Amino acid sequence: MVSNSYLIFIILAFTLGGVLIMKRETIPTPLKKWMALTAVIMICLAFYLIVYSLLNIGSNPQ
């Protein structure tokens, strides 16, 4: 169940980053800075979760 949550978070983080890049002209300036900062933090955490999951492939879940 935890890996499903990781996968959902990773997909949402990269989707948020993509939407912010595609719609950067229509987002108000004060909101743009905070949404970009949130997206960067989420994407960094998503990369961490990807690396963590790859390092733990084949480990015993007990």
Image (cartoon, grey):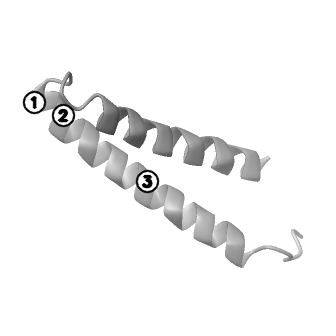
Q: Is residue 51 above or below residue 15?
A: below
Mark 2 in CB contact with mark 3 (< 8 angstroms):
no
Tell me, for residue 32, which label it has, or none: 2
State how far apart marks 2 and 1 are (Cα): 5 Å
Q: Is residue 57 above or below residue 28?
A: below
Q: Secondary structure at mark 1?
A: helix
Which is more toward the observer, 1 or 14? Answer: 14
Count of numbered marks: 3
Name the kind of residue labelled 3 in the image.
Answer: Ile
Name the kind of residue labelled 1 in the image.
Answer: Thr
Please identify the quarter of the rendering in which residue 61 is found: bottom right
Q: Quadrant of the C terminus?
A: bottom right
- Residue at position x 69%, y 78% in the image: 55
Q: Earlier in the sequence, mark 2 or mark 3?
A: 2
Residue bearing mark 1: 29
- Residue at position x 21%, y 39% in the image: 34
Query: Where residue 47 sits in the image (x, y, percent)?
Result: 51, 63
Please identify the quarter of the rendering in which residue 11 is found: top right
Q: Secondary structure at mark 3?
A: helix
State how far apart marks 2 and 3 are (Cα): 16 Å
Name the kind of residue labelled 2 in the image.
Answer: Lys
Label 1 Cα neighbours within 10 Å, binned few <14 / some 14-19 / many ≥20: few
Mark 2 in CB contact with mark 1 (< 8 angstroms):
yes
Residue bearing mark 3: 43
State how far apart marks 3 and 1 are (Cα): 21 Å
Left or right position of 18 against 8: left
Label 3 Cα neighbours within 10 Å, binned few <14 / some 14-19 / many ≥20: many
